[in-house]
Image (tube, rainbow, N blue to C red):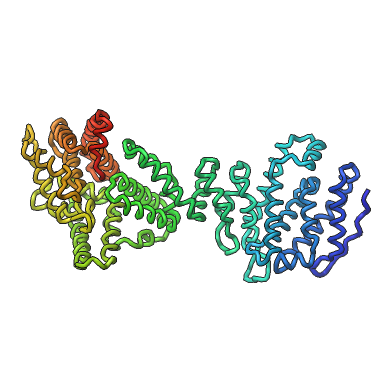
Amino acid sequence: MSQPLVPLQQKAEPLLDVQEMQLWLEKAVAWGQADSPDARKDTCLHLSRLRDFLQQLLTHIHNTSSTTETMKRLPVIGQFLGRLCWNHYVTADATSRRLLFQCLWGLYSEHPSNAVEGKANQWIRKVLCQLTTEEDDTATQTLVKHMGVPTTQYHLKVLRKMVALVQENIGKGCSLLGDLSQRCSCDSILAASEACVPLVTCAEAAPLIGALLQRPLICARAALSEDFLDALSSAYSSNCLLLEEQAVVSMWYHSLSSLEEAVLSLLESVLANTGSTLHRLEQQLAQSLLPKACAQHCSIFLVVNDIFRSILKQLEGNECVKSVIHTFTNRFVRELSLLQPKMSISLKAFFPQSPQNLLGPLLTQPSEMPQESWRHHLNWLSGSLQRLTEEEEEDEDGSSTRGHHKVFEAWFLLVQCAHWMQATAQLLVTARPEDCDPLLRLLTFYHHPTNRGHHRAQQLVRAKDAWDHLCPLFSVLACPPPIDHLQSLVALLSPNPQQPSLAPLSVLDLLVNFAVFSQKSLSGSTEILQTVVDRTGLVSEAVCVLGSLELRLNGGSCLSSDSNRVHLRIKALQNTLTHMYAAQSPAEKQAHTHPL
């Protein structure tokens, strides 16, 4: 049986005596080497006094400027704490376990200044992680044998207690109070996050992970481990981790890589199958937390917007990409409105690069103003964009990028607010010749924003020509449709080897909108659309435009009195085109694919 411990002396100063620490170390060694009733009895006998000593030790650690200084004063502190951490009779006591963990976190150096502190960090991480694993070590087996508790159940209980303890400690406020020479309670945050790396997929650790992620960043020492954030991102993206909504938002806020991965994953899932993309888009975005996260944190929205901006530059003619960006922005604005007036951040902070005079007019929904005001509103937008593009074109040598940047940002905002493009196309169906020019300019700008590679002036001529042919084609009185106008429209939409840059985007948009909104019978409109897209090979592209149109109408770009008729016509036209596309052979689909 081990010898009794000498009485502890009360000390006025916070420093501990090295000899006293050595006595406790000898006691810890004796407890660890013997597994007998006498050893267990001796452990229990000294447990209360051990707690008192651990409390003094914790005070000493907090009052010492660094881990290096602590280890110089108490060179056996590592052996002492390590042996106690492996003694299950000591760690079974909640107070002793809490003090042990706090001592370890107090020794952890957020920014190691030397090799000693670096090695100490590695050892502390190992001890904290090992304490939460389910390995059947000899000490655990011995304890389980005496307790009669299954090994897995024992480890889960230990893990839950540890999680609760750490969660309680990280919830405490910053204790730095301006004294940089003192230890800060926030120093334990980094250590706790690193200890959680092997536990990210463990359900018992979910409350702790959530608490770490959602702790306010009021102190520079409260940073989370990059390894911890990377492990979380990997586990979450592979569906091995369940987190509450706010914890997920906080993960994106803390980790740029996890946010980028979430955005790209959303884009990939939406654009993976263009045949069903637009029908699933609203549902997928409704289930995504990204719009809500963007509304809560301006910094998250700016990152997401930059990703969309980059994707749009690469795939500027892809209507499906435009639909994703527009629908996402719509949901973001909706989430943002739910937070007002709690949030005082202005829209300018969310759209710092957008032309500020266009921001309010474009973010306003068509449903928020009378339809008789749409034409005036769109004419103003058309004039504003025309002035912006004219300023860009004044730079004849094209060396300046400033004007081009302004035009691109105006176009990007227009893509985000594409509900106004739907209103534009809808008004063109019933517009008088003297009223159509501003609307056609706006539609052409949406599809061909710059003259550099887009030949906007030529596209505008083609759009006006197409409108001149579409009006008589979709006239209620025109039955059967005039053959000359039909052939001219096919020619405008067919590939032109002499002018390969003239894509059929704006013309196809006009054709689909005339088929949907004109007063011509559904059968007559279907016949015209079917004939034109069949001869030009633009079946799949027309399906995509129809899907985009349907999504935009959800934003209120159609009068409610006419919405039922319009949606019925869209469904009927979609069914016709879908059957046409399905009937094509793979070779025909490949031969008739035109990039949009």
Q: Estimate the x, y position of residue 263 in percent, counting from the top left.
A: 42, 49
Exactly how many numbered labels are in the figure? 0
Residue 147, given in percent of the width and then of the height, sits at 80, 37
What residue is at 63 percent from the left and 68 percent from the top? 177
Expressed as whole percent of the image width and height from the top left, the position of residue 416 reads 31, 52
Q: Is residue 97 visible?
A: yes
Left or right: residue 418 versus residue 248 is left
At horizontal 87% and vertical 53% (from top left) the residue drawn is 27
The residue nearer to you, when weighing 446 against 416, is 446
Instruction: Name the side, left or right, on which 171 lies relative to 595.
Output: right
* Quarter of the image with the C terminus in it: top left
Q: From the viewer's perspective, is residue 297 above or below residue 367?
A: below
Compared across the picture, whether 42 is left or right of 554 comes to: right
The answer, for residue 371, to whether it is visible in the render is no
**What's the residue at 74%, 55% (across, down)?**
99
Q: Residue at x 71, y 61 (%)?
A: 107
- Specify the quadrant of the image occupied by residue 450: bottom left
In the image, residue 106 above or below residue 538: below
Determine whether 306 is above or below 237 in the image: below
Residue 1 or residue 584, whichever sits in front: 584
